[in-house]
Amino acid sequence: MNKCIITGSNGYLGSLLVKKFKDLSWDVCEFSSTKKENQVEFKLSEANSINDKYFNNCNLLIHTSYDFSIKSNCDYNANIDGSIKLFEKAYNNGVERIINISTISSFKNSKSFYGKTKFQIEEKSKKFNVINLRPGLFCGSNSKIIKKIENICNIFPLIPMIGDGSFKLHLTNYDDLFKFILEIYEDKDLNFSKILYPCTFEPISFKQLIKIISNNKKTFSVPLSLIFFALKILGILKINLPLDLDNLRGLVYYSDEINFDDTKKYKTEFKSL
């Protein structure tokens, strides 16, 4: 029986992957900070204390854990250090494949703190043969972000648009991501040094996305500078919104250096909406 470890197993992506691997009769070891029955308690800040026994005879590790309470640079970032300690343990204990779920907003000059953090994790993970995946905006299987946009579109007769809505989006269907992970696992000639982009190769604009979700409702443009200012003020006041300032930076600021050549070698096709 194949065995995999999934971190963040109580998160939306993690729990979905757990179910899909169990449906294929894999032995799934669930790591979670919000430990439930038959799960292993896993905190990024305490990654070095994980018992090596969990990695025994493990074929695949998928790392989805991320601590969103860490909002800014500091001397110690558990997301970075904890991820690297996890990868080191998996590598030293002979785990066959190690996959890190990163983000398409991860690149050298990323404007978002989330993207910068993920990029540092990618860079530091290379010596442990970690396969870094940069998915786009998740859709399908009741995606939380798509559901939030749908709710906004249902409430308002006229939809507020972020700027002119021209910024590009690549979409990742959850089911397609799972198929892609299985392909990677089976690829005996995998080049660990390559970044892979499991998402639609052709982007759509945010405006196109809104048009599709709202069934072509009319929109009005809200200047990007005004939205940034409002989110900054609300952040200072500690008012929680579905979209915060860092989320918006990751959504709007796009890297033109995306190269799909290595991803296109695989058979999985990524669906749009």
Image (cartoon, grey):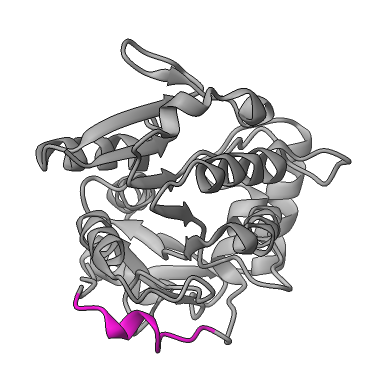
Q: Is residue 158 visible?
A: no
Q: 188 or 34, which is in the foreground?
A: 188
Is residue 266 part of the magenta span, yes or no?
yes
Q: Relative to residue 5, is residue 187 drawn left or right?
A: left
Q: Residue at x 40, y 69 (%)?
A: 219
Q: Give coordinates of residue 164: x percent, y percent.
A: 53, 77
Which image quarter holds the N terminus?
A: top left
Question: In the figure, 92 relative to 200: above or below?
Answer: above
The image quarter in which residue 107 lies = bottom right
Q: Is residue 80 visible?
A: yes
Question: In the figure, 256 relative to 245: above or below?
Answer: below
Q: Give coordinates of residue 51: x percent, y percent.
A: 53, 22
Q: Relative to residue 57, is residue 19 drawn left or right?
A: left
Which image quarter holds the C terminus?
A: bottom left
Magenta highlight: main SS: loop
Q: Relative to residue 65, is residue 18 drawn left or right?
A: left
Which residue is the extreme one toward the right? 75
Is residue 212 part of the magenta span, yes or no?
no
Q: 220 or 36, which is in the foreground?
A: 36
The image quarter in which residue 214 lies = bottom left
Q: Give coordinates of residue 12: x percent, y percent.
A: 35, 37
Q: Residue at x 71, y 30 (%)?
A: 238
The image quarter in which residue 75 lies = top right
Question: In the figure, 172 relative to 203: above or below?
Answer: above
Q: 256 or 85, which is in the foreground?
A: 85
Q: Residue at x 11, y 37 (%)?
A: 25
Q: Relative to residue 77, is residue 194 drawn left or right?
A: left
Q: Residue at x 48, y 86 (%)?
A: 259
| Count of labels in the image | 0
Q: Give coordinates of residue 213: x percent, y percent.
A: 26, 62
Identify the magenta region. 258-267
